[in-house]
Amino acid sequence: MAATGISHLVFPFIFLLSLCTSASQHLNVKLYIVYMGDVPSPDYSQTAATASHVLLLHPVLGSHEAAHESLVHSYWKSFNGFAAWLSSSHVQHLSSTEGVVSVFKSKKAQLLTSRSWDFVGLPLSQQTNYLEYQSDVIVGVLDSGVWPESESFDDAGLGPIPSKWRGLCETTPDFKACNKKLIGARFYYRGFTSPLPAGEFLSPRDSDGHGTHTASTVAGSIVRNASLFGLAQGNVRGGVPGARIAMYKACWSLSCSDVDLLAAFDDAIYDGVDVISVSIGYSTGGFLPPPDYFEDSIAIGAFHAMKRGILTSNSACNDALEGSVCNFSPWSLTVAASTIDRQFKSELTLENQMSFEGHAINTFIMEQPWYPLVYGGDAANVSGGFSSEDSSGCGLYSLDPSIVEGKIVVCYLSSPGDLPDGGVYVSGGAGAIIMYDPMNDTAFSFMVPATVISRKQGEVVRSYINSTRSPIASIAKSVAGNDSPAPITASFSSKGPSKITPDLLKPDITAPGVDILAAWSKVAPMSIDPLDKRVVDFNIISGTSMSCPHATGAAAYVKSFHPDWSPAAIKSALMTTALDATLDGNEAAELGYGAGQINPLKAINPGLVYDTDANSYINMLCSQGYNETSLRLLTGEFISCSSKLSKQGVWELNYPSIMVISNASEPFLAQFPRTVTNVGPAKSTYEVKIDAPFGMNVTVEPDTLTFTSSNQKMSYNVKIESQVIPDNYALLSGALTWSFGNYSVRSPILVYYDVKQ
Ligand SMILES: *[C@@H]1O[C@H](CO)[C@@H](O)[C@H](O)[C@H]1NC(C)=O
Ligand SMILES: *[C@@H]1O[C@H](CO)[C@@H](O)[C@H](O)[C@H]1NC(C)=O
Ligand SMILES: *[C@@H]1O[C@H](CO)[C@@H](O)[C@H](O)[C@H]1NC(C)=O
Ligand SMILES: *[C@@H]1O[C@H](CO)[C@@H](O)[C@H](O)[C@H]1NC(C)=O
Ligand SMILES: *[C@@H]1O[C@H](CO)[C@@H](O)[C@H](O)[C@H]1NC(C)=O
Ligand SMILES: *[C@@H]1O[C@H](CO)[C@@H](O)[C@H](O)[C@H]1NC(C)=O
Ligand SMILES: *[C@@H]1O[C@H](CO)[C@@H](O)[C@H](O)[C@H]1NC(C)=O
Ligand SMILES: *[C@@H]1O[C@H](CO)[C@@H](O)[C@H](O)[C@H]1NC(C)=O
């Protein structure tokens, strides 16, 4: 049970915005999405859409007026459907109505730097040499809004807005204008029925920090010598500093409703963005079944974006566990988070000369060299009814100020949600030493001077407290070390396989998502705690929310060199050139990092790509049991499913990775037909190199591909036969690589056995 809370409870600042259920307006009616697939005609209009949606609702609700009243929003620009207040009997009725693909309750999803671009091999010089290529690229970011005055959105040096842009900038009294960097900004709040929480701006302005951080990571301008109180100092910029940003604010107070996310996708696709970044996910904790593809607004939006040639890059979620990956639709890029070589350390020193290398983003320089030390369990707010056990975690109000005031308090972080710094802060403590073992790869911010050490180290500190009459200690301001082994999949990053299509390897790729410096909202507390009054222009935070915009930036970088490449080609280029992240510490292997860490510079020249079109995804869906009627609505074309209910349909998808999932009861033979398109030198001969997973025979036919022209396609077949059957759980990794000169086109192979499945 403990693991479920990791993303939001224990450390609410692992970032990913997420979707929950809306409150009902009337008794028994709830907000639903009625999704109807592709737009019926290219000249579909808002008037036509609304009229047809009311017409559809009329017989269900009994009258034209009731139909009008229940309709909340019509989608018509990029796909067809609407949001409406409905009861369960209305839903039943509508589900069997012709033209409807799915009806689902509006859920709410959660929102889930200086060094990171250098770490992935994209130095500032390579970004700035090609700024003019980037100026036509528009990145759509669905998030919590943006702080437009941030230096990261300065438009100095940018040319006119690309003529293809047809979006808009919604101005309000607190959001005056966009510029040539931030070319679009809109906000959506129809999915919210309760009043907006205090401090929210009813405008595209970001009160949270999340959207400002992600947007600046994708395409922020270059800001020289940025830092967080001197930490992580460097040239902060996005992956494509010359590209344009359009912000679609669909998230409020860390949550985003389906109604608004779909409206944001509907607009973004129509407005003319080139890539969409979504650091948002339905976190299921790895236990609950995730929504089906066509009950998942992000998968729906990404599908229609793909059909219009737009790649959606989205976060893999922060639920740590195997099987907890979210946003795994085959037509989107699913991004895990990994570390970079920088780690923030804040040293704890005891007066007896012992010291401990704690990890934290501790920006405080303590006024005195030493402070008295006390254990939280020895400082309970007894008059308030708190026991020593309660106060050992230093939770809010659990400490007695007359004991802890002016002291450093030692706290166990045990129960989810009990952030110890709040308790120490309100009772006047000078600092906190937090004992916590999980997630020691990630540094967090606290609103008092604090560092995080292991429980084992904590016991040493406690016995020191016992051993002396007046124990004293000091906590140093953090320093950054640049020597940690990396990239390693972040402990919090959700792992595959996906619960809906386990035979498709997800996540696809990994990118830096740990301790990332980027722009911040001026009204958002630095440590997320509302009591924290530190105002910062740049903040350091972690999450798959931070890795996703790195991958989006890399995708936009590739797009700037190859404006005509399909979403699948861009994804393939990123995956086949990724840095193989096989490093010690990556226990979940490819289930953690997919093809490996993004390598943008290589991705612009991949040699070969695995291209895929909408029909191939449709064929795959046929094999997953989706019926022809629904699929016809998705594509607007007649669909005849040739492969029905089989793994083959997934294996046949022309995907840049290969996965077999087996329950190990018997040997298997799996075949993967693949087609590559030559985007490198016209005349080229690629040879295959196979690194077979342990105990597998892998054969590739043919094993040489000779191209004579650009964009030529050639096919081959991969056969995987199991020889040895492990008797329990096993992850067997391998790879298939096509090489020609400097070109190396690598696909990971993962065979996953789990007899318990
Ligand atoms: C297709 O699926 C929908 C929803 O599951 C169902 O209502 C419909 O009857 C199905 N159609 C066919 C032809 O099986
Ligand atoms: C860079 O920023 C740091 C910290 O804010 C400051 O001390 C330093 O003077 C700045 N350096 C330059 C060259 O501006
Ligand atoms: C002690 O507990 C009481 C009761 O919960 C609370 O009202 C009071 O604020 C607490 N004191 C401190 C300093 O947290
Ligand atoms: C995190 O904890 C593990 C297990 O206790 C340990 O092996 C590892 O060295 C720790 N990593 C860091 C960065 O402290
Ligand atoms: C410190 O002393 C307390 C009792 O005074 C005891 O319960 C605790 O186990 C001791 N802790 C250590 C680490 O020695
Ligand atoms: C295990 O695999 C065998 C052979 O493919 C299959 O018949 C059986 O249904 C599978 N069992 C489970 C629980 O998936
Ligand atoms: C795997 O390959 C080896 C050597 O080519 C062969 O002897 C063996 O029979 C093969 N096993 C399977 C299961 O195909
Ligand atoms: C291969 O890479 C090397 C080193 O990066 C470079 O000097 C050489 O020109 C490249 N060759 C080709 C054919 O691209």
Image: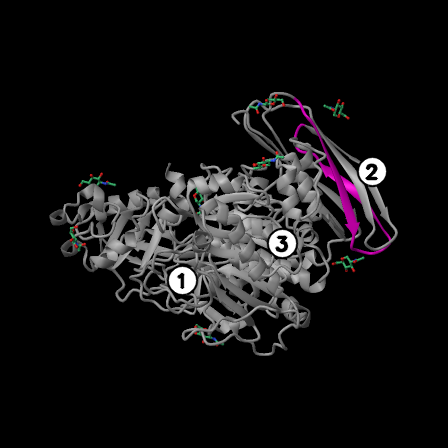
**Camera sees residue 491:** no
Q: Which mark is residue 702?
A: 2
| Ligand 4 located in image quadrant | top left
In the rendered image, residue 154, in percent from the top left (x then y), is placed at 53, 75
Residue pointed to by mark 1: 208
Q: Which residues are magenta?
A: 667-695
In the rendered image, residue 13, in percent from the top left (x then y), is placed at 40, 54
Judged from this view, the residue extending furthest toward the front is 63
- Quadrant of residue 129 in the image? bottom right
- Quadrant of residue 210 in the image? bottom left
User: What main secondary structure does the magenta stretch of the protein show?
Assistant: strand
Whether disc 2's CB lies below 8 Å from ligand 7 is answered no
Looking at the image, tell me whether mark 2 or mark 1 is earlier in sequence order.
1
In the rendered image, residue 77, in percent from the top left (x then y), is placed at 59, 59
Q: CA distance from mark 3 to mark 1?
A: 34 Å
Q: CA distance from mark 2 to mark 1?
A: 54 Å
